[in-house]
Image (spheres, rainbow, N blue to C red):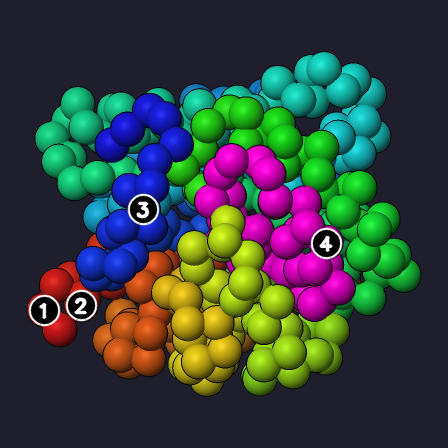
Amino acid sequence: MTSDPSPGLADALAAGTVVLDGGMSNQLESAGHDLSDELWSARLLSERPEAVTEAHLAYFRAGASVAITASYQATFEGFGKRGIGREEAARLIASSVELAREAARRAADTGVRRPLWVAASVGPYGAMLADGAEYRGRYGLGVAALERFHRPRMEVLAAAAPDVLALETVPDADEAAALLRAVRGLGVPAWLSYTVDGRRTRAGQPLEEAFAPAADVDEVIAVGVNCCAPGDVRPAVEIAARVTGKPVVVYPNSGETWDARTRAWTGPATFGAAQVRAWREAGARLIGGCCRVGPDVIRSIGRALETA
């Protein structure tokens, strides 16, 4: 574990497979925290930062080597709706990286000896809207407007010195184009991860077209999918690896379905650790879980990869 941005994660992906963490929200909810407002887990950056550190620590102890910060829904606009000014909002956004770093320090102090990295979450524009738009895309904004939305928050996160920026749960190739423009010159590597429905983005673009622009962006060290059904992962991995030639990142949901109207999960979980072997064979090098995937599943992913 290092305290400064490092090319170590990119090197690790070239050498083998790295285990990601699981869902931040479900881990916080399992600890008794109420996330039923528009800021979601980002609210705890202000109200209960220790809870965020404890959630990261649970995943490090379960075998994860990468913690994704609680900044997914942390935006200047979202905090502004709560009367939080830009200076304080910037402090809270940056604090998400330090909370994950603190968890890594505690993990190391208690005997975890593997390398640990921090990925600063950059959620989609739809996450700020808090109405399920991150599963639809097509916000009615152009690439330039989306870049203007993302760039200030990405600058704050980059200045906080994470190991990588997680451009995640992107539903739309137009938003990906904005993020790829915004990441240039920040001095921090990134991964780009779509949320998908079959072989298309949530907005309906073919994945071959959606992944292609990332192939020539030097800052991007991995591409892939997250916050999707486990059954959609392998085809996406194959497409991403073929189109970009880059390592692939995957962290699907449990398999349950999110109902944005009722803000509840329905249906059975279908994510099993045995699936990760097939994903690795197809080109996945960063493997973890997203919504409703907790430390027990992350632990089983690590074991499955060790025994494969």
Q: Where is the C terminus found, in terms of image quarters?
A: bottom left
Q: Is residue 53 above or below residue 73?
A: above
Picture quadrant of residue 245: bottom left
The secondary element bearing badge 3 is classed as helix
Question: Which of pointers 2 and 4 indicates the residue nearer the eye?
Answer: 4
The magenta region covers 165-192
Tell me the amino acid under the disc marked 4.
Ala
Q: Residue 33: image x %, image y %?
A: 52, 35
Q: Give the residue pinned by disc 3.
A: 9
**Residue visible at 57% across and 71% down?**
211
For the residues bearing labels 1 and 2, Cβ distance under 8 angstroms: yes
Q: Is residue 207 above or below residue 77?
A: below
Q: Residue 232: image x %, image y %?
A: 49, 80
The secondary element bearing badge 2 is classed as helix
Tell me the amino acid under the disc marked 3.
Leu
* Circle 1 Cα neighbour tier, 10 Å, few/some/many (<14 / 14–19 / ≥20): few
The secondary element bearing badge 4 is classed as helix
Mark pair 3, 4: CA separation: 24 Å
Q: Give the residue pinned by disc 4.
A: 178
Q: Give the residue pinned by disc 1.
A: 307
Question: Which of pointers 3 and 2 indicates the residue nearer the eye?
Answer: 3
Mark pair 1, 4: CA separation: 40 Å
